[in-house]
Amino acid sequence: MTLERARALLRDAPVVDGHNDLPWAMRVLARYDLNAVDLAADQSSLLHTDLDRLRAGGVGAQFWSVYVRSDLAGDHAVSATLEQIDFVRALIERFPDRLRAAYSAQDMEDARAGGRIASLLGAEGGHSIDCSLATLRALYRLGVRYMTLTHNDNVPWADSATDEPKAGGLTAFGKEVVREMNRLGMLVDLSHVSPETMRDALAISEAPVIFSHSSARALCDHPRNVPDDVLAALPGNGGVAMVTFVPKFVLPEAVRWTAEADENMVAHGFHPLDTSPAGMECQRAFEAEHPRPVPTVATVADHLDHMREVAGIEHIGIGGDFDGTAFVTAGLDDVSGYPNLVAELLVRGWSDSDIAKLTWHNAVRVLRDAEAVASELQRIRPPSLATIEELDGTR
């Protein structure tokens, strides 16, 4: 009964998911070939995502991550990002009855009204712009509506959460990147960045920021999660923190286990983030010998309860990170699982209106607010021509 109520709520206020790595997964599996992997068919043996499961999960808008690994650099990172964008465009063109390209908050609303999934782009990692504000502007014109300032490694102008601090947060050029993103209307995504980078960005950003896929550090002390002081600053900024389901970000016991699994991957010649069939076979063999601590829907709901308490109901959302993780949370095994999370929140006493803010309204509002800021800034500020050499003195 509760699950049926959850599904009904999602028909009115579907999920805006902040982060899905299907484009990179398709690069690894099939070099983006939509004939080789038909996403209109059941792909549960290969992927967390296909079109039927998106519909079953009540997803109404998806930020597709146009991610490239941070060991790609310079022109290689830029060109790989362009390939990811090209794939998402091809996906939308292949399924126009299911998906609609979205570049604005109004596009999201229009897609929902037309019964299609609004498809937006998020670039994961500042290495995708190769220290070039002109490249940043080009990505915006191609439809990118957020950029995660770093991935797992530092960029020359910003510190990552999972690298040794070098810049101490944002450099002068890094702050200029944030200002230019504000001027464009591109959301500043603070998932993956260090707490110092988070605080610097919040101090300088004139528009709301997001965390596209991060959970609460107070509940799971992983550097990828958001500290309470940063969550508490979101109301003043207007931003949104989107809870993720990756086990090592929600369950403390999974942090150590995943570190050991990563070491095993490297020992067998795989990148820790390799989710190819061969990489997953290596992961499953390790898991068979070392049982994995498995979080549940309740674990994720605990994070949402905490984030709501600290940041407020207007400042939280959902970013599953599906197809970007080897391991998942029980009950949130793929993109069809969102009703299970909503049902858990209903049992905990969340109101219909609060759930609607979590799933749809907060994310749409944050993009609309960023667009309004950009409209004002573009009247008073020209495109920045600054370079990293000029502002930081080195590259």
Image (cartoon, rainbow, N blue to C red):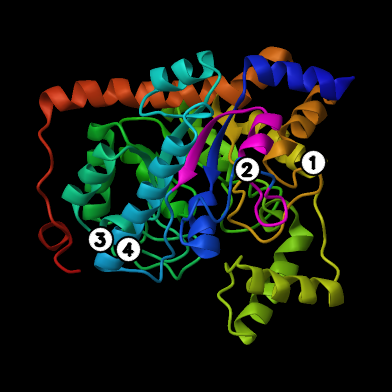
Viewer can see residue 21: no
Name the mark nearer the viewer: 4 or 2: 2
Kind of residue indicated by mark 3: Asp
Question: How far is disc 2 from disc 3 in space, using C-alphas?
Answer: 32 Å
Viewer can see residue 281: yes
Kind of residue indicated by mark 2: Asp
Q: Position of residue 360 (x, y in %)?
A: 57, 23
Q: Give the residue drawn at x 57%, y 53%.
A: 37
Q: Give the residue drawn at x 80%, y 17%.
A: 5
Name the mark nearer the viewer: 4 or 1: 4
Per the image, label 1 sits on a secondary structure element best described as helix
Q: Give the residue drawn at x 51%, y 26%.
A: 97
**Crowd tier of the residue under label 4, counting other residues whose Cα lies within 10 Å: few below 14, some 14–19, many 20 or above:** many
Instruction: Say which mark, if any, is on residue 297.
Output: 1
Q: From the viewer's perspective, is 233 left or right of 37?
A: left
Kind of residue indicated by mark 4: Ala
Instruction: Say which mark, if any, is on residue 77.
Output: 4
In primary-sequence order, the first of circles 1 and 2 is: 2
Q: From the viewer's perspective, is 168 left or right of 288?
A: left
Q: Are marks 4 and 3 in contact (CB under 8 Å)?
A: yes
In the rendered view, would you say 23 is above or below 290?
Answer: above
Q: Position of residue 10 (x, y in %)?
A: 68, 21
In primary-sequence order, the first of circles 3 and 1 is: 3
Q: Which residues are magenta?
A: 43-65
